[in-house]
């Protein structure tokens, strides 16, 4: 019904149990002194569930976290005291590989040189300036001599022309001026040769052509250093350009000695005069200079920039990988791995990992609990469900841990026949989901299978493909367990899981491109083994979990056996109740199938709902269906005593169910199948009697103690119980009368609020009514009347009269009893 869960929670809050109220004054005072007040909170189921979630998460975190957390301090060459297997997956710094990368990067960085490309033009300009000056000077000197020899010619010069003043210089000063202009030293004899030749332009051209080619190619101080540092080439930084220009071919560059040798070997037009040729070569040697200089600062900056881009190289050691065997001497590789393990696995990291797993599992379990309570109508069984899920979660972790240890043992043994990771496919992960679907609910099992897959993958540090495999395995397993009715079906479900496991592994291998060798195909077979083990474990564990209060379809199928001691006892001592229970079971089962409830639970609950009417103290003959001919025993009792007998059969039924361990769901149905209904016949009878004596009648004495039905199955048993009993009283059970009677009863219980906590909807009530009418029409069908003899007529008349006399003493129902309820609904 709408808001039923909120009503249940409101009822629970209004009736919070006081754990101290049943204690005496002395005991309460002693408990207050000895037991802390906060411990009494755990008397509430809410805090019990939180305590269970926290405890399970903490234990699971300890199981998932690797146990081998210790530091290893071993020296090179020392024999290993034990076989060391990596407890976690970690990375180790590979110094040699990193240094190799650094060397390669440094080799790839080209040295940077500053190049003076303007040196050629500067030298050419100095040569031209020096020769032009000397040529002009010699010309002026010649003119001055000529004027001195012919003074008349100078007088004939017009006055308006400005005469240049010639200032003669001695040879020493003139030589110094020439050296300053050309930027090179010259000997007095060489200067005299050039002066004697009048600093001829041809000499200038020879000098320029000798210097220019050398300067254009570039000159370094030491070519050997250039070739050593610039094996991959160099970078040139020109003065007039911002961009660095690479130069791979260094053969064209001269060093200073090669440039001088080139000049000495160069031919020129003045070779006919050895003195002149010598002077020109001397000037050329002095004019050339180093034009390419190594820039150490910028070269180092380029190296640092390149080194900053180099990433350290690590190699991975996988979890479960053997680092060293016992007695094996340690080499540098072992030392590096142990140092990496110590660094990645300090002692305090275990507690950090445990805390992380604890919080993760706490969230997952709380989400499952919340979903179960809020969306699956399992508020009353939340604690029991959580206990089972906790046990299955811890059991799954232990199974996976054992499988992982087996895988590690295979790795340590060095056997190449079986892949260590292949053993992980044989883990029976689907067992938890199968048992959850069998004992709790298929929807919870679906969510729980995802949690199991996550937890198992975390335990062995698997990848997304392994998680996918475990999740698919769990879903297939739970689907095969929803409608299981015997143990053999569980084994068949395990076989189906195995087949699907094979398909899943094959699909994963093909997706990874690994399905090539025989060993990889062998892993597919291990998946089938995992499914088969899941079926076997589920079959073997289910009988061990059922006595803890979990009700399975298999258990209910066994309880539905008519040879059950309680049913046989009912058939012998209360045959009417026995027959009535079977019919109610048929009605409840059909209606459960119509609304999507559990038909097995509804049927079995109906078969045992009246077992409280059986036994020496139960007085089965005080119930109408077990009374034969003769007076009604209630005629001799007070109405309150009769009501007490009727109410007590619920209490006796609960006691018998607990004695025979029928399971909590069956016990709940027995306790709730009458809800808090009023026993109207005896209540009205008590009112009539009280009117004569002016006494008051307490309605509580004539009501069942409840509670009202909390589940759909309990509500179905209540409805089927009243519908079957009421329709039995119809004199002419036509379809129309049956339908009217059933509708009246269902609407009456609905209007009284007996179904408010059962989560039934109006749509469900409509489907239930249709199912009841269809089934009751088959049960109460009419037959063709056979011809009667005179003796049969007389006998039947006597029988009918006796039955009528008997019916006078039985509790009856008012004709308008349920009509009032219909009017209350506005129908």
Image (cartoon, rainbow, N blue to C red):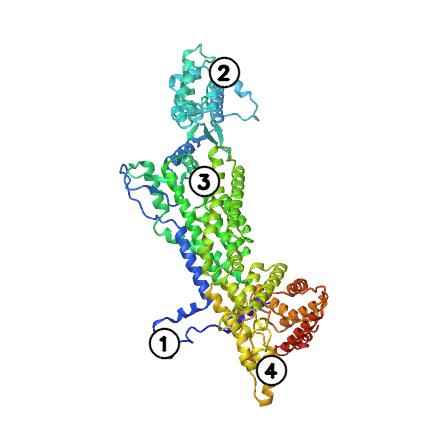
Mark 3 lies on a secondary structure that is: helix
Image quadrant in which the C terminus is located? bottom right
Residue 293: % across, % down: 42, 29
Residue 744: % across, % down: 67, 71
Measure how far apart labels 4 and 1 are at the Cα level: 45 Å
Instruction: Using the image, determine if residue 537 lies above or below residue 272.
Output: below
Instruction: Using the image, determine if residue 708 lies above or below residue 547.
Output: below
Mark 1 lies on a secondary structure that is: helix
Measure how far apart labels 1 and 2 are at the Cα level: 132 Å
Measure how far apart labels 2 and 4 are at the Cα level: 153 Å
Q: Residue furthest top?
A: 272
Based on the displayed image, in which of its 4 quarters is residue 290 positioned? top left
Mark 4 lies on a secondary structure that is: helix
Residue at mark 3: 422
Residue 742 appears left or right of 359: right
Mark 2 lies on a secondary structure that is: helix
Measure how far apart labels 1 and 3 are at the Cα level: 61 Å
Residue 362 appears left or right of 763: left
Residue at mark 1: 27
> Pointer 3 and pointer 2: residues touching (CB < 8 Å)?
no
Q: Nearer the viewer, mark 4 or mark 1?
A: 4
């Amino acid at each position: 019904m709408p808001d039923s869960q909120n009503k249940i929670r409101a009822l629970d809050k209004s009736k919070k149990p006081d754990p101290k109220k049943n204690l005496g004054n002395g005991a309460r005072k002693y408990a207050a002194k000895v037991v802390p007040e906060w411990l009494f909170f755990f008397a509430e189921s809410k805090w019990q569930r939180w305590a269970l979630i926290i405890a399970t998460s903490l234990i699971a975190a300890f199981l998932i976290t690797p146990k081998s957390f210790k530091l290893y301090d071993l020296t090179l060459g020392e024999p290993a005291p034990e076989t060391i297997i990596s407890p976690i997956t970690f990375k180790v710094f590979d110094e040699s590989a990193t240094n190799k990368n650094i060397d390669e990067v440094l080799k790839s960085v080209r040295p940077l040189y500053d190049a003076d490309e303007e040196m050629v033009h500067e030298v050419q300009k100095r040569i031209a300036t020096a020769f032009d000056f000397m040529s002009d000077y010699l010309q002026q000197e010649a003119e001055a001599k000529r004027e001195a020899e012919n003074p008349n010619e100078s007088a004939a010069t017009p006055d308006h022309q400005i005469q240049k003043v010639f200032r003669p210089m001695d040879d020493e000063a003139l030589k110094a001026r020439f050296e300053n202009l050309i930027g090179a030293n010259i000997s007095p004899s060489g200067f005299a040769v050039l002066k004697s030749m009048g600093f001829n332009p041809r000499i200038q051209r020879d000098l320029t052509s000798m210097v220019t080619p050398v300067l254009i190619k570039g000159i370094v101080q030491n070519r050997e250093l250039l070739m050593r540092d610039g094996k991959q080439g160099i970078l040139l930084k020109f003065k007039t350009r911002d961009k660095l220009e690479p130069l791979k071919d260094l053969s064209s560059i001269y060093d200073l000695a090669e440039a001088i040798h080139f000049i000495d070997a160069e031919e020129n037009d003045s070779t006919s005069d050895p003195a002149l040729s010598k002077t020109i070569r001397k000037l050329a040697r002095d004019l050339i200079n180093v034009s390419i200089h190594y820039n150490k600062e910028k070269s180092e900056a380029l190296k640092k920039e390149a080194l900053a881009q180099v990433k350290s190289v690590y190699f991975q050691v996988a979890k479960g990988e053997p680092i060293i065997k016992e007695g094996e001497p340690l080499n540098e590789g072992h030392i590096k791995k142990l140092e990496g393990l110590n660094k990645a696995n300090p002692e305090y990291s275990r507690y950090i990992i445990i805390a992380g797993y604890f919080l993760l599992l706490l969230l997952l379990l709380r989400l499952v609990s919340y979903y179960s309570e809020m969306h699956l109508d399992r508020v009353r069984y939340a604690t029991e469900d959580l206990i089972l899920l906790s046990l299955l979660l811890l059991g799954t972790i232990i199974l996976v841990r054992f499988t992982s240890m087996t895988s590690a043992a295979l790795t340590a043994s060095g056997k190449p026949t079986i892949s260590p990771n292949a053993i992980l496919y044989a883990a029976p992960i689907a067992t938890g989901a199968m048992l959850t679907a069998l004992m709790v609910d298929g929807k919870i099992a679906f969510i729980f299978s995802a949690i199991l897959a996550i937890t198992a993958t975390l335990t062995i540090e698997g990848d997304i493909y392994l998680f996918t495999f475990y999740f698919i395995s769990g879903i297939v397993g739970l689907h095969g367990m929803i409608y299981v009715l015997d143990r053999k079906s569980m084994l068949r479900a395990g076989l189906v899981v195995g087949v699907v496991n094979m398909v899943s592994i094959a699909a994963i291998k093909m997706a990874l491109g690994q399905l090539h060798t025989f060993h990889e195909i062998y892993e597919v077979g291990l998946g089938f083994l995992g499914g088969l083990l899941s079926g076997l474990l589920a079959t073997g564990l289910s009988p061990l979990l059922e006595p803890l209060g979990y009700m399975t379809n298999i258990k209910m199928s066994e309880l539905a056996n008519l040879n059950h001691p309680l049913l046989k006892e009912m058939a012998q001592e209360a045959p009417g109740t026995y027959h009535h229970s079977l019919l109610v079971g048929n009605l409840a089962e059909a209606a459960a199938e119509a609304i999507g409830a559990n038909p097995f639970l509804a049927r079995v609950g109906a078969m045992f709902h009246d077992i409280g009417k059986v036994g020496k103290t139960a007085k089965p003959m005080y119930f109408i269906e077990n009374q034969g001919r003769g007076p009604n025993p209630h005629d001799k009792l007070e109405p309150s005593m009769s009501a007490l007998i009727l109410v007590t059969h619920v209490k006796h039924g609960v006691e018998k169910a607990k004695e025979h361990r029928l399971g909590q769901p069956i016990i709940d149905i027995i306790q709730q199948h009458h809800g808090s209904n009023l026993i109207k016949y005896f209540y009205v009878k008590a009112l009539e009697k009280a009117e004569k004596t002016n006494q008051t009648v307490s309605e509580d004495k004539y009501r069942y103690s409840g509670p009202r039905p909390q589940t759909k199955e309990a509500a179905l048993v209540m409805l089927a119980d009243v519908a079957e009993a009421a329709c039995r009283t119809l004199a002419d059970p036509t379809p129309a009368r049956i339908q009217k009677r059933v509708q009246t009863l269902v609407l009456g219980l609905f209007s009284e609020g007996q179904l408010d906590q059962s989560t039934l909807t109006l749509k469900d009530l409509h489907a239930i009514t249709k199912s009841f009418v269809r089934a009751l029409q088959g049960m109460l069908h009419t037959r063709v009347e056979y011809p009667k003899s005179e003796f049969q007529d007389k006998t039947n008349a006597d029988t009918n009269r006796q039955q009528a006399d008997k019916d006078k003493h039985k509790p009856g129902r008012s004709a308008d009893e349920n009509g009032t309820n219909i009017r209350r609904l506005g129908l």
